[in-house]
Amino acid sequence: MTVESEFPQLIRTSAGKRGPTQDEERRLRAAGFVRVAGIDEVGRGPIAGPVVAGAVVLPDLEGFEHVDLHLIRDSKTLSALQLQRANALVREIALCAAVGECTSGEIDTLGIAPATRQAMRRALNGLPDAPTHLLIDAFPLDWNLVPCTSIIKGDALCTAISAASIIAKVYRDGIMEQMEVAHPGYGFASHKGYASAIHLQAVARLGPSPIHRKSFSPFKPKLFDLNA
């Protein structure tokens, strides 16, 4: 693999049991890429709410010790309390970090894949210092001609991607908890917009809320009764 290429690279590998490492970040820095950003998204699957991306540039954590350092891993493996602790640590140690989102309306207009990339670009645009290389969880991205490496299961393998997944999930979970207040009755605080049985029953009873993704199948014809 030639990391200097401006075209996205793809690393296919399997997650090990030892947790994410900074191996790929260190290789890229050794190759001359000063600021390596990890990028990840949350919220592609739900039928309601935004898709959110995180972007994080970490320092080299060799020799760094912290009681919560082991929590910087795939956000899907963390409890709600662990997520909050991990998010606080990422925010404390990151050289820079930002989130970006695309609303449910934008998802309906653009489609979920373009909306996810747009959320990633917005997160990257929010960083005070532009990264010189991108590490993304299995999702190649074209952004300002910055070279990109896409890693299968990157959130389980790469510390920077794990950190990005954590800040994105905490941010999106917070949005969905706010939507519980703005649009009561759907249970957004508990299922976070995913198509749980309770959520689908609520939509069937109440109809779609303003934050539901009305373009999503298979729920579109049955639950949203659109003539599209």
Image (cartoon, rainbow, N blue to C red):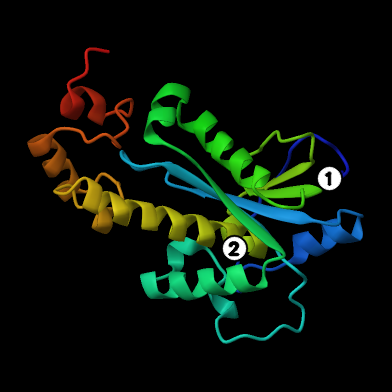
Front residue of 93/215: it is 93
| Placement of 144 over or under 225, stated as above or below | below
Task: Locate residue 46 relative to residue 119 in the image: left or right.
Answer: left
Quarter of the figure with the C terminus: top left
* x and y percentages locating residue 62 in the rendered image: 77, 78
Front residue of 126/48: it is 126
Residue visible at 58% across and 62% down in the picture: 162
Report how many numbered discs are placed on residues in the image. 2
Q: Which residue is mark 1?
A: 1
Secondary structure state at the residue bearing disc 1 = loop
Task: Locate residue 42 relative to residue 160 in the image: left or right.
Answer: left
Q: Bin the neighbour count of mark 2 within 10 Å (Cα to Cα): few under 14, some 14-19, many 20 and up.
A: many
Q: CA distance from mark 2 to mark 1?
A: 24 Å
* x and y percentages locating residue 4 in the rendered image: 88, 43
2 or 1: mark nearer the eye: 2
Task: Give residue 80's quadrant in the image.
Answer: bottom left
| Placement of 159 over or under 154, stated as above or below | below
Q: Amino acid at mark 2?
A: Ala
Residue visible at 84% across and 56% down in the picture: 28
Q: Which residue is mark 2?
A: 163
* x and y percentages locating residue 2 in the rendered image: 87, 43
Front residue of 95/6: it is 95
Secondary structure state at the residue bearing disc 2 = helix
Task: Give residue 69's quadrant in the image.
Answer: bottom right
